[in-house]
Amino acid sequence: MMNQASRRRFLTASGFGGIGLFWQQTIGRIAAGADSNGTAKSVILIFNCGAPSHIDLWDLKPQATDTVRGPYKPISTSAAGIQISELIPGLARHAHRFSIVRSVHHAHASHNAGMYWSIVGRPYPMDSTLINPSRNDMPSFGTLAGWLAQRDGYSGSLPPYVITPAPHCDSTVYLTPGQYGGSLGPAFDPLVLNADPNSPSFSVPNLGPVEGISTQRQEQRQSLLGQLGNRVIPVSAAGTDDFEINRSKALSLMGSTAAREAFDLSQESPSLRDRYGRHTWGQSHLLARRLVEAGVRFVTTVNGQSIIWDTHQDNFGRLEKTLVPPMERAFSTLLDDLVERGLLDSTLVIWMGDFGRTPKINANAGRDHWPQCYSMVLAGGGIQGGQVVGESDSTGAIPKSRPVSPADIHATVFSALGYDPRGISYHLADGRPFQLSDGEVIRELL
């Protein structure tokens, strides 16, 4: 005969498995509130796993030797005095809208550790690729944006933090720490699609009702599960809280018509979908726009499966043939689309990777890992466009002026969102308080 605890597990397994994100938890406001000067309401992070070559895209060195400069010529842009690579002419016309930071640097040369430092704004305890997320991780700025939204009473029908189409990772075995809830707990895990928005059959897994289960029957199951939960002696075990939170998230998502509509790309015109590009990156960028338009606070769109930008071999051929064309098309169309819809002023768009690539071209016509100096781009959301912040040396190897750390980028993002990065704190799993960022706001960007 099945006891109450077993019956509860049975009912849970029969259609209420956990997915997604619980976004409707309302947490009261605390002291150290928002800075009213913030312009951005949401963030789209375009992350290039594997690390794109800064020297071949944003910080060309035409006067360097041929062992450094590569085959590409700099071209003029819509911003006076700013040149970027001929590989990205579509983005050149947007230069008046974005700022290039050419002096970003950190000290982790392994992909997952480098991605962690980039998205968390602090170094991982070791420089390694063979690491995975845990509840001891410090949270990324996407995680913290969701935490801040919920702290401030966010009650939207969509999660505040979404990753599309797949998580940051170096292979599907080693996922980048920091991108989930980490020390803040499972309530702040992102909704990770793990689905291709370009697929004709694209849908968010488990978003709709369970097949063959009517709404009435689903509600009855939920009611019965709640009754059993009230009668069963609470179990204290690792993962119990995570399980309960994920079950609540799943039930909320399954009942949300607004969530299903936001993920429905068929509502967009075929011509606009063509403009973004009928590929995974293009449709992920379009989905990101739909999500922020629907109220999501932070969307990460990952450009590539695993570390596809890791060009140790055939750097130039891969950039030209497979990497840059879909990235540029998706990024430039996203900027156009946000402008056309009046959303760019309220949406901060960030383009970045784990680190940069070596100034010296290796024997395999590739470039290797280089965190000592690299570039990133920011647009919209109060960012002052048409400028370059920082300068690298003659080979793009080290910052020559205005060195910038990932922490400084994070402080700037939080400030753009209206939060004092040093005036608001969260707690790690061991109870230690940490401020949103220990970096310095890059004032010339805002």
Image: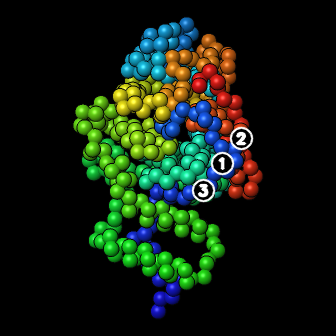
Residue 100 in view (yes/no): yes
Q: Residues within 10 Å of mark 3 (few under 14, many from 20)?
A: some
Which mark is on residue 248? none
Instruction: Identify which residue, 106 or 3, lies in the foreground.
Output: 3
Residue type marked 2 = Gly
- Identified at 46% across, 57% down, the residue is 20
Residue 285 location (% of width, % of height): 39, 37
User: Would residue 93 be found to the left or right of residue 384 on screen?
Assistant: left
Colouring chosen for the image of the structure: rainbow
Residue 3 lies, with reference to residue 177, above or below; the image says below
Q: Earlier in the sequence, mark 1 or mark 3?
A: 3
Q: Residues within 10 Å of mark 2 (few under 14, many from 20)?
A: some
Picture quadrant of residue 444: top right
Q: CA distance from mark 3 to mark 2?
A: 18 Å
Q: Which residue is mark 3?
A: 27
Q: Report if the CB atoms under discs 3 and 2 are less than 8 Å apart.
A: no
Residue 178 in view (yes/no): no
User: Would residue 27 be found to the left or right of residue 220 on screen?
Assistant: right
Q: Report if the CB atoms under discs 1 and 3 are less than 8 Å apart.
A: no
> What kind of element bears circle 3?
loop
Q: Earlier in the sequence, mark 1 or mark 2?
A: 1
Residue type marked 1 = Met
- Identified at 50% across, 57% down, the residue is 24
- Marks 1, 3: nearer the viewer: 3
Q: Earlier in the sequence, mark 3 or mark 2?
A: 3
Q: Which residue is mark 2?
A: 423
Q: Which residue is mark 1?
A: 138
User: Would residue 99 be found to the left or right of residue 30 on screen?
Assistant: left
Q: CA distance from mark 1 to mark 2?
A: 17 Å
Residue 348 location (% of width, % of height): 50, 33
